[in-house]
Image: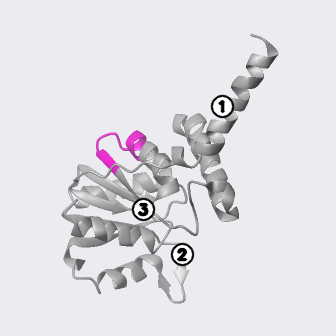
């Protein structure tokens, strides 16, 4: 292969990754399930998207997993999540799953305990759009006894497909690609 041909291939690949880099992070394939699980890490768009899917009949139950190590004034995030749930008409169909892990991989194993309590086998995961591909890959790998589908919540201040146009979008895209590559190349094999 000539140097010119190799250069052309590299430029083409770089251009494709540049233009599609953010789109490759996002999966959006919600399916009807036993339970919706809203992953920790964000407390507005993700829960709202989960409630929308619950109202649309995608599942009979919704579980919010929230980190026990974070506090807001006097309350832990799971306590605040339960207070929020109690204000909703869907409250009897919703619950909180307190987690202590810092990674999505640890989160998956802790969520498995909550899924056993609600007797779920088909699970619809809800997470931020940029986190969907990695979360889906981690949950399906770590919890192979379950069937997963995934839905994305959107926060236009944090992420967008034209990632090069906004500093925050660029940071989010770069950080998520680093995490995804780390999962695929290293963490998945441990």
* Location of mark 2 (residue): 70
Relative to 102, does residue 87 appear above or below in the rendering?
Answer: below
| Residue name at image x 66 percent, y 43 percent | 18
| Bounds of the magenta segment | 139-149
Residue 145 within the segment the image draws in magenta: yes
Element assignment for label 3: loop
Q: Which one is nearer the viewer's eye here, 17 or 12? A: 12
| Residue name at image x 74 percent, y 17 percent | 5
- Which callout, 1 or 3, points to the residue nearer the camera? 1
| Residue name at image x 22 percent, y 70 percent | 55
Of the image marks 1 and 2, the number of the one nearer the N terminus: 1
- Tell me how far mark 1 sits from mark 2, CA to CA: 41 Å
Q: Which one is nearer the viewer's eye here, 70 or 178? A: 178
Element assignment for label 1: helix
Which of the image's four quarters has the N terminus? top right
- Left or right: 127 in relation to 102: left
| Residue 6 in which image quadrant | top right
Marking on residue 39:
3
Marking on residue 21:
none
Instruction: Classify 10 Å Cα crowding around label 3: few (below 14), some (14-19), many (20 and above).
Output: many
The single residue placed furthest to the bottom in the displayed view is: 74
Q: Which one is nearer the viewer's eye here, 97 or 60? A: 60
Marking on residue 13:
1
Of the image marks 1 and 3, the number of the one nearer the N terminus: 1
Relative to 57, does residue 182 appear above or below in the rendering?
Answer: above
Residue 85 drawn at (x, y percent)? 31, 80
- Tell me how far mark 1 sits from mark 3, CA to CA: 33 Å
The single residue placed furthest to the right in the displayed view is: 3
- Tell me how far mark 2 sits from mark 3, CA to CA: 15 Å
Residue 170 drawn at (x, y percent)? 67, 57
Relative to 111, does residue 184 appear above or below in the rendering?
Answer: above
């Amino acid at each position: 292969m000539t140097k010119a041909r190799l250069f052309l291939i590299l430029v083409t690949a770089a251009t494709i990754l540049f233009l599609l880099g953010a789109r490759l992070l996002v999966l959006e394939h919600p399916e009807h399930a036993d339970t919706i699980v809203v992953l920790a890490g964000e407390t507005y768009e993700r829960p709202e998207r989960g409630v929308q899917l619950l109202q649309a009949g995608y599942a009979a139950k919704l579980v919010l997993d929230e980190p026990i190590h974070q506090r807001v004034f006097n309350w832990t995030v799971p306590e605040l999540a339960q207070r929020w749930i109690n204000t909703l008409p869907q409250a009897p169909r919703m619950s909180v799953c307190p987690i202590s892990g810092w990674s999505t991989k640890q989160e998956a194993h802790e969520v498995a305990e909550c899924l056993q309590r609600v007797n779920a086998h088909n699970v619809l995961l809800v997470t931020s759009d940029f986190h969907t591909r990695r979360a889906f890959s981690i949950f399906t790998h770590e919890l192979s006894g379950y069937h997963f589908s995934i839905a994305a919540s959107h926060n236009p201040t944090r992420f967008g497909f034209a990632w090069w146009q906004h500093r925050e979008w660029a940071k989010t895209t770069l950080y998520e690609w680093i995490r995804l590559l780390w999962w695929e190349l290293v963490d998945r094999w441990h």
